[in-house]
Image (cartoon, helix red, strand yellow):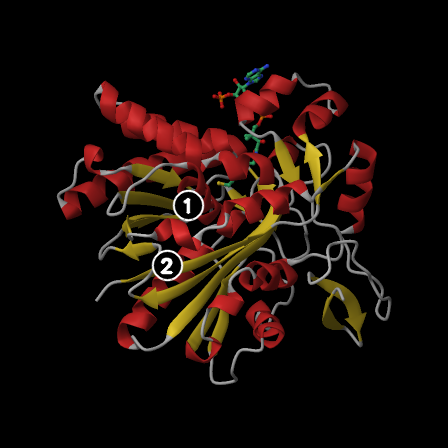
Amino acid sequence: MQVGIDKIGFFTPNKYVDMVDLAHARNQDPNKFLIGIGQSEMSVADQTQDAVSMGINATLRYLDRIDKDKVGLLVLGTESGIDQSKSASLFVKTALKLKPEVRTFEVKEACFGLTVALMVARDFVRVHPEQTAIVIGSDIARYGVKTRGEVTQGAGSISMLVKATPSILALNNGHSAYSEDINDFWRPNDSRVALVDGKYSTQIYLDFFKKTFADYKKQKDLATKDFAAIIYHLPFTKMGLKANRIAVADQDETNTKKLQSSFESSKLLSNRVGNIYTASLYLSLLSLLENGNLSAGSLVGLFSYGSGAMAEFYSGKLVAGYEQELDRAADEKMLNRRQKLSIPEYEHIFNEALTDPADGQELTSDDEVGTWYFAGLRDHIRQYKKII
Ligand code: COA
């Protein structure tokens, strides 16, 4: 029985910063950000968007096209958690009006969170083929104003429905995983911004890619040329470019061009959204499907990396008719609805979002009607509302 991704929903907040503006404000050559880092824009979450609200909004992109009663599992991966105990997925479950019998929880291993949620969902559906699962990755990448990581921030969410006989990507059996207890990136409990050793993280990411890609090919008796595309976790698109260069290093011109072209298609959304941690790899998948030209049956390799560090390479096959499940125009509209912030506006919004509002203070959102948002705390309980 084939199990895999049946629906994909994407959400990003309604504000962004242009990297050329940021480069000028930080006295940097714009080409360092545009080419050296590979980012042209980054979405900015104000105080009203968090892991919960973005996860709700991403799932609403496809919720009216699924049978809600069949959803038996809801897993949310995030490293932008809103509570130390209660799962963010419970707030999401309530907003989506899923049945109380659903099994739901939150998972964490840095940017690996959505991949592990997907694997849990795949195994769940294999055991319960009549049920489906929703998996969500939802994150705000924050390093801080005027830090070196500032250019690699972003915000957004990807939600996917996992199902037997899927319509988009059938997941293949097997995977190659690799982990080591290292300190390349982490976020202490008392901090809303991450601490990172960016150069070290890049080196580990590339080492883990080499290991897991080689192990996977050996395990499955595959060659690099068998992949129509390889996609990557993209904390910034240059990182994936470096990994893709490793992938094609020993390939002939035809294969090199094929994998370079698919990588270019896969990075377009991340280039405008920025880092969305757990969901970044799946934003690459969405971007590849919407902008590439892959035929049914194409083999897609996926490299997932979470700092700390845990990596996994696995693959899936595109299902005939997958294009019908996509809505490129709506995703484009979502990006284009964003309001461009001046750098002082961005700095103000960013710093304001580093703390929660005072208990009892009601927040309002300036996003579109139908969007869910964090409306503030009442008796220290987070309130989520829909704009009507
Ligand atoms: N034109 C084109 N490229 C330029 C340039 C210019 N004018 N100026 C610099 N560059 C290139 C550099 O050569 C370098 O390329 P390379 O990576 O291929 O060597 C790149 O731009 C970045 O420059 P660098 O000086 O290394 O940038 P930095 O010291 O400001 O740090 C990061 C960049 C990515 C390390 C930093 O932003 C960071 O730590 N981000 C967080 C990363 C992260 O999230 N990691 C964990 C998740 S996996």
Examine the rendered structure and indicate whether residue 285 appears above or below residue 248: below
User: Quarter-wise, where is residue 362 in the image?
Assistant: bottom right
Left or right of 231? Residue 211 is: left
x and y percentages locating residue 162 in the rendered image: 38, 64
For the residue pair 51 and 148, the one nearer the viewer reads as 51
The response on whether ligand 1 sits within 8 Å of label 1 is no
The residue positioned 60% from the left and 18% from the top of the image is 31
Q: Is residue 154 visible?
A: no
The residue identified by callout 2 is 5
The residue positioned 57% from the left and 49% from the top of the image is 330
x and y percentages locating residue 179 in the rendered image: 35, 49
Secondary structure at badge 2 equals strand
The residue identified by callout 1 is 285
Give the farthest residue toward the left: 221
For the residue pair 166 and 253, the one nearer the viewer reads as 166
Secondary structure at badge 1 equals helix
Q: Is residue 127 visible?
A: yes
Left or right of 231? Residue 382 is: right
For the residue pair 254 and 243, the one nearer the viewer reads as 254
The residue positioned 35% from the left and 37% from the top of the image is 293
Lower position in the chain sequence, tag 1 or tag 2: 2
Dot 1 crowding, Cα within 10 Å, few <14, some 14–19, many 20+? many
Left or right of 360? Residue 252 is: left
Left or right of 189? Residue 297 is: left
x and y percentages locating residue 216 in the rendered image: 22, 45
Q: Quarter of the image for the C terminus: give it.
A: bottom right
> In the image, which disc is placed on residue 62?
none
Tag 1 and tag 2, C-beta contact below 8 Å: yes
What amino acid is found at the position of numbered circle 1 in the picture? Leu
What amino acid is found at the position of numbered circle 2 in the picture? Ile
The residue positioned 77% from the left and 65% from the top of the image is 375
